[in-house]
Image (spheres, rainbow, N blue to C red):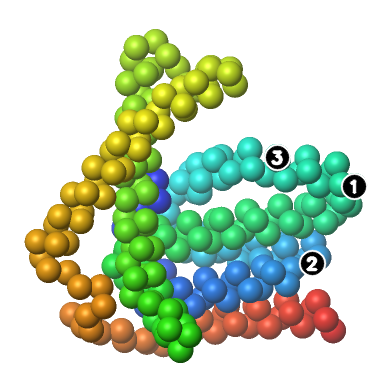
Amino acid sequence: MFHSIGSYYPTSSVIHKRNSIVKVLSCLIFLILCAFINSKEACVVAAIFTLILVLMSYIPLSLFIKSLKSLSLFLIFIIIIDLCLHVPLAVISIMIVKIVLIVIYSYYLILTTKVFDLTRGLAFVLAPLKIFKVQVNKVALSLTLALRFIPSIIDEANNILFAYKTRGIDYSSANIKNKIKILSNILIPMFVLAIRRADNLAMVMSARMYDVNATRTSLCKNKINFGDVVYLSVHLILMVAIIYRRYI
């Protein structure tokens, strides 16, 4: 089955059936608990917890491995900088594990939640910011458009790379200098495609008289069932346990 990177992956798992608001809140809780991880034991517990969620989603592990491959250069850069600053290896390893867990969980959230549902969940979580006069609807719309079109842009980039490959220019086997040249040649058509997509989207929204500041309603009701409560409770318990383990 072909799957675009960063887009919804449909399965019949219990994770996919969870309420989008609950999943976004759980993701926020997971980010908080990762911030409090300071030991190898906590890293192992968080890693096992993340692995269980991934397995329960029935999503192939190969998709998560692909997402980590794109992160490898960034991780290597962080390791080199920390070694130059004489940061202890134990601290570096914990930090790397935390980054990997955050990336995997964020990707897991995107794969198990439809873009519309994810936007609704984000709008609910960001709703308290209205007190500070933050335009939550515009923020949620921007996040929705990013989540919707990033996979499409990545697919276009892959198509351009494939076109290069058919002409005898293989990006995967090229050296660093040639890779930089290929990427620099890709940027211009990618920029043109992104502007064209944005222009088409703006015309469609204008034709439909879309108003981002209008009061919006939803056809689907946000019903929270017992499974959602259990899902959120498990995240809360894990967060409390890790914070308790750190300070007590």
**Residue drawn 35% across the image and 47% down it:** 151
Q: Position of residue 157 (x, y in %)?
A: 37, 34
Residue 45 visible somewhere in the drawing: yes
Q: Residue at x 46, y 46 (%)?
A: 63
**x 68%, y 83%: residue:** 240
Q: Nearer the viewer, residue 3 or 188?
A: 188
Is residue 119 in view?
no
Residue sitting at x 80%, y 52%: 92
Task: Quadrant for the C terminus, please.
Answer: bottom right
The picture places residue 218, in percent across and down from the top left corner, at: 21, 80
Q: CA distance from mark 1 to mark 2?
A: 18 Å
Residue bearing mark 2: 38
Amino acid on which disc 2 is placed:
Asn
For the residues labelled 3 and 2, say whether their Cβ atoms are less than 8 Å apart: no
Please rate how many residues cluster around mark 2, counting C-alpha atoms within 10 Å: few if below 14, some from 14 to 19, many from 20.
Answer: some
Q: Position of residue 156 (x, y in %)?
A: 32, 36
> Please, what secondary structure does the residue beneath circle 3 have?
helix
Q: Secondary structure at mark 2?
A: loop
Q: Which residue is mark 1?
A: 86
Determine which residue is flagged by label 3: 76
Question: Residue 228 vs residue 100: left or right?
Answer: left
Front of the two marks 3 and 2: 3
Q: CA distance from mark 1 to mark 3?
A: 15 Å
Q: Residue furthest top?
A: 168
